[in-house]
Image: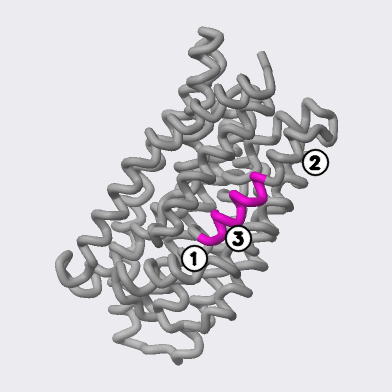
Amino acid sequence: MNALLLTGLALAALYAIAIGANDMANIIGVLVGGKVTSYKIAVAVFTSSVIAGALLQGHMVIKTLGRGIVKTLDIHGAVAASLAAILWIIIASRLGLPVSTSQSAVSSVIGVGLAYILKKWEWSLVDFSVINKILISWLASPALAMLLAAIIYTSLNRLLEKKAPKEGLIKALAVTLAGWDGYSFGANDVANATGVYLAVMEVAGYSRGIGASVLLALLGAVFIALGGVIMGRRVAETVGFKITRLDPVGSISSSLVSASSTWLFTTIPYMVMGYGIPVSTTYITVGTVMGIGVAKYRSIKRGLNVKLVLTILSAWVLTLPIAALLGMCFYYALVILFGGA
């Protein structure tokens, strides 16, 4: 295994830690913000479920990042994408912003793909139909999540007014749904860290097909869990407390919408076209929390920290061009330093 590939896999592990710090906190924040369970228990539930999701279904989106957007990422492109995404995500995490690691990863790969096109003048190197589907999911998923969360939260509250179950049952349901949310997260988001190395691993002959995907999924899942444990608290507080205050019913509503949406985007497109969609679990989670806040307080002004939401939206808008530009720059720098076609 050459030094550049080893460096790339080390970067993938580092990126996975950043993903855990930024994205895993979304689910933990919902549980803790809703006063469903302690931070430690929430971390334990999520850690076990994210590893299961990554190992069982992570290959579905790993294929998209590794061979779907760009037909074949070489080692320079893979490392460049990792570097670009890492730089942007670490900055966002230090600011306590739940920026999308999926958007950062995909944008970085798009930037590398554009660099390929500019270098070789071959538009066929990038599959723009896959990119279009991903972009549509970025726009549709948070809006849909916000609407569904508001509807489910309102419906559950009305149902519980008629026949209120024991508080322990509600909390158990919230933890169970958070586990499903963690599973869906692992299945979809592990590719953000390791997916770009799929073609490199296959070409190098270390493992092929599903075998390479499982190895990459395991690497990503372990370090995502580590990142959530050691660095996730700050963003958890942002999602769980600062956007809006969640009660246990809010936690249930948020987890149900987030888990089902993420799982469907992972599974259905893979069954239909052979590629899972790397949807932003951050977009979905923040969308659900926003929807619950508006439904709970019946007012945007009272239900949301509008200033914080606008700050998050600004970071989302900046991610695509910044990560793509960084991906291009890192690719050209690596080619100059190490040579390459």
> Depth check: 210 or 173 in front?
210
**Which numbered dot is residue 25?**
1
Local packing at callout 2 (Cα closer than 10 Å; few below 14, some 14-19, many 20+) is few
**Circle 2 residue:** 211
Q: Image height check: is 21 above or below 210?
A: below
Which is more foreground, mark 2 or mark 1?
1
Residue at disc 1, secondary structure:
helix
Taking the spot 66% from the left edge, 57% from the top edge, the residue there is 223
Q: Position of residue 164 (x, y in %)?
A: 37, 89
Q: Quadrant of residue 79?
A: top right
- In depth, the one of 188 and 192 nearer the eye is 192
What stretch of residues is rendered in magenta?
11-21
Type of amino acid at the residue the image marks with label 3: Tyr
Position of residue 296 in the picture relative to residue 250 (left or right)? left
Check residue 53 for magenta coloring: no
Does residue 61 appear to the left or right of 319 in the view shown?
A: right
Q: Position of residue 302 (x, y in %)?
A: 17, 72
Q: Which mark is residue 183?
A: 3
